[in-house]
Amino acid sequence: MAQRESFDYVVVGGGSAGAVIAARLTEDPATRVLLLEAGPPAEADEIDVPAAFANLFKTRWDWNYQTTEQKQLEGRRAYWPRMKALGGCSSMNAMIYIRGNRLDFDTWRDDHGATGWGHDDVLAYFVRSEANQRLGAPLHGQDGPLHVEDRRYTHPLTSMWVDSSVAAGFKPNDDFNGAEQDGAGLYQVTCRKGRRWSTYRAYLEPALGRTNLTVRTGALAHRIELEGGRAVGVRYEHQGRVETAYAEAEVVLCGGAVNSPQLLMLSGIGPGAHLRETGIEVAVDLPPVGSNLHDHPALPLVFGTRGTTDLLDHNTLVQFVRAKATGTGPLTSNVGEGGGFFRSREDLPAPDLQVHVAPSGFWDNALHEATQRCVTVAPTLVHVASRGSVRLRSADPHWHPDIDAGYYDDQADLDAMIAGVRRCLETVATGPLAEHVGAPTLPTMQGWGADPTDAQIEAHVRAESQTLYHPVGTCAMGSDERAVVDPELRVRGVEGLRVADASVMPVVTRGNTNAPSIMIGERAADLLRSGGAR
């Protein structure tokens, strides 16, 4: 008879939060951790080269998700790239280091009952994780595992946009994670000496030599094993065999906003009626599982340029080899080099829009290569009213679930995006950038003129909006019936089971979500170490 394989903790998902948790827990040599990752090791050449992240889209490194037909996007199915490898999306993102606004975390605490998750509570975890090249105490850390630096390369078009946006009324801002978020500037990135610094590099790789950490890649979780209302292990597929790993303390799900609710539902934890329709026996009827899905929609405004280069001019094998070998050159750009935060209405308590500026043509997830030199200015909605859901299509864990992003289902989101487009048009028509910006290149922008109508902008919003790769909310934390997990990240109605990833955010943060996902991993590790088994 095969020996029962047992650990203290089984962590499902080696991504932005899971890698942090596995590394932190195994700092105690007496704590045994199994980390299961469905994807392979993070060994693609493109991972290290910042500008090459989109080359990983629609490859074996990508879950290659698509949403359901989005009724507000002309019935389009939106493509959602999600990294399938150690480091998760921190191995495939644009590396922009944004924590979010103070109001975001205070809203988690005050409006959702997520005690212990207010801004002043979580700041210490951001600081603990960070090794910032330029910025220091009290708001930044310089000794953590996560390297954050100013990019080694900035294209002149990006610097011109910053100057133009200031001329158009934005405040200059050299730290979007400082005292104030509003304004325009250049983004800091999670890189070390010009190369991507994922949670695999920062946390997991240094821990791989520990005898109390076991990492299995190519391990697809099938379900959580439950006994007497308690999570006791994980059933998973590895190297053609289905096996069970048991957890003596707890099981921790870190699969993200798609995979974590999917695994809960496959295990019989979720909306009872839906589970029964899918042929799954209900273990815990927990209606909020998979609900509250929301994402940051981004809208590319792409213009031809004159009298300048763009990033595509430098996309050569020589520059790729240079960037990978030395961490220098144009391909150390993260593409979305600059941007900022602003408000669609003056009466708002915090920014609801972010801008991402790329010195190249970046639209439809960069799946098309521009045929001319371009600059892209992309307003992005970061305070989102619309909500969607994740639902099972099958009881087979190999099937992708139904993902309904709900983009622009709330009119407030559309109104805010239209206002954001108008503000971004002002930035490209003002200051030094205006001398280099030519005609728009995307079909629904052509013929706009200097002052497009709301109807023209709306048509472009519906035709070209895409994900900014920030889905959250499907296992929301809180203290009421909307919550899947409590403020200690424990799944309601199940003992010994927690979720720790972007899915627990009850409301998406204002800005890129990788840094807060890492913070969630840091805080979850402390909760696990202090709380033990429940």
Image (cartoon, rainbow, N blue to C red):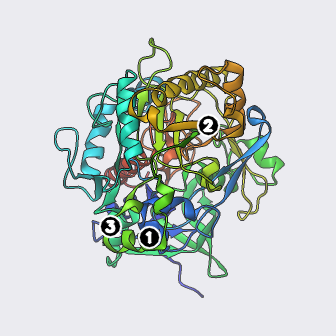
Q: Is residue 204 above or below residue 164?
A: below
Mark 2–mark 1 Cα distance, whole angstroms, equals 29 Å
Disc 2 residue type (three-letter): Pro
Residue drawn at (45%, 16%), measured in percent from left and top? 348
Residue drawn at (69%, 29%), measured in percent from left and top? 447
Residue furthest out toward the left? 137
Percent from the top left, x then y, of residue 261?
62, 49
Does label 2 or label 3 sit earlier along the sequence? 3
For label 2, count other residues whose C-alpha is less than 10 Å away and answer few (under 14), some (14-19) or many (20+): many
- 15 or 352: nearer the eye? 352
Disc 1 residue type (three-letter): Phe
Is 205 situated left or right of 382 in this image? left
State which mark lies toward you, 2 or 1: 2
Is 212 situated left or right of 507 in this image? left
Mark 1–mark 3 Cα distance, whole angstroms, equals 10 Å
SS category of the residue bearing label 3: loop
| Residue 320's disc number | 1
Does label 1 or label 3 sit earlier along the sequence? 1
Q: Is residue 197 above or below residue 487?
A: below
